[in-house]
Structure formats: structure tokens, C-alpha cells
Image (spheres, rainbow, N blue to C red):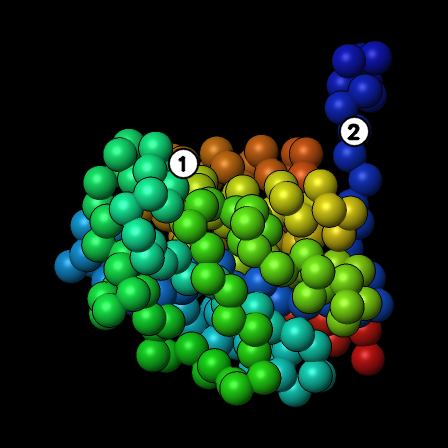
Amino acid sequence: MTDHQRSLERSAQGLGRRPALIVVDVINGFTDPVCPLGSEADEVVAANVALMQVFHEHGWPVALTTVIYRCESEARVFRNRLPALNLLTPDSHWVAFDPRLPVRQSDWLIEKIHASAFHGTSLHEQLQEAQIDSLVVTGLTTSGCVRASAVDGLQNNYKVVVPIEAVGDRDANAHSANLYDLNAKYADVLTLKDTLALLMALD
């Protein structure tokens, strides 16, 4: 092994004793291919259903994010760059969570206007209050909001796991490249099976 290769070694972090599940933007606008923002995401939804059920069974927090623009000034530059985002208005079908998700009244519903689940929201404060030490970050899309949320999770000092089957992207190449980079620097990218095994080991 060269000195350069040794300098890039990473250490797997796994999960702490008190994890939370962050389901990023598994909303109709991203899971329905009819929407310009959407793609076929049945497998991603199914993986999120499985994870949500485990977190609910253990009483661990589940936070679900959606994107809603309530006025013209919100995220103006972002929306000018991606005009399809203007579909995400409060009265739109697209901002509702995919109906297949087993959302409970106790789940945290996080409304955001930018990519990261942390940026401009109360998520970090809620996690701190619940004494959370690690995150499982899932959802759509891998190269956008999932990546931003996972990186911000690390930057807020949480161990982060990203289950491969529970995230998706409209671009397969972007999906693969971002999972590779996340695993190299910011998170443990694991299969759904291995993620569930980590969670079960916490018992």
C-alpha cells in the first residue's frame, strides 16, 4: 500500500445506540414518473417501508421530509435553475408523502426548501432533544437531497448509514457515483440487509 493510499483509508462507523431514520423526499413528485421531478421508485419505496416498520417497532424516531414552496422568494436561485421545482406548492399532490409509506402520527414531518434535510429546518434540534447519535438516511434523490442530508448529518457529528436499496436517482450513473463518494468520505453505504442486521444488533 502506498503512502497516498494509506492516507485515504476510511474507518467504518456503523450506528450508535440511538439511531433515527431520515426519509428524504419520498413524496409523490419524486416517486411518480408522470411528474417531471419523478422516476420509477417502487423498490426504493419498498425498502423505506421495511426500514420504517423496524424503527416504529423499536420506538426510534422517524423523520420524513418534503419540499414545499410557499412564496416566490423562497429558494429563488435554486428554483430558477430547476424550474420544475415550482410544481411543489402547498396545495399540490406532488408534495404529499407516497401513500405506501406507513407514516405514523408520532413521525416527525420536516418541511424544507433546499436540498439538505438540515438546512433551514429544526431537524438537528429535534435529534439532539431525542439524544440521537446516528442516522440512517434514505430517499430521493441520491445525487441531490440524500447526499446533501447525509453530508450534513456527518457535519453535525452523527454517524451516518445509507442503505443502497433505499435510495434512488433519475440518473443511474449519478446514483452509483454518489454512493461511491459518500462511502469514501461521509457515510457507511450498506445493503438493506446489512443495515437491518445493524439495527437488529442494537437489541
Question: Which residue is rendered at x = 36% and y = 79% of the image?
Answer: 100
Q: Is mark 2 on a helix, strand or loop?
A: loop
Question: In the figure, residue 46 lies in which quadrant?
Answer: bottom left
Q: Residues within 10 Å of mark 1 (few under 14, many from 20)?
A: some
Mark sitting on residue 9: 2
Instruction: From the viewer's perspective, tell me whether residue 14 is left or right of residue 35.
Output: right
Residues 178 and 96: in front is: 96
Mark sitting on residue 174: 1
Residues 129 and 191: in front is: 129
Mark 1 → mark 2, Cα distance in angstroms:
23 Å
Identity, as a three-letter code, of the amino acid under mark 1: Ala
In the rendered image, residue 127, in percent from the top left (x then y), is placed at 71, 64
Of mark 1 and mark 2, the one earlier in the sequence is 2
In the rendered image, residue 38, in percent from the top left (x then y), is placed at 26, 54
Which quadrant is home to the C terminus?
bottom right
Instruction: From the viewer's perspective, tell me whether residue 162 is left or right of residue 70.
Output: right
In the rendered image, residue 3, in percent from the top left (x then y), is placed at 83, 12
Mark sitting on residue 75: none
Question: In the figure, residue 39 lies in which quadrant?
Answer: bottom left
Task: Work out whether 101 lies above or below 157.
Answer: below
Identity, as a three-letter code, of the amino acid under mark 2: Glu
Q: How crowded is mark 2: few (under 14 residues within 10 Å), some or many (20 or more)?
A: few
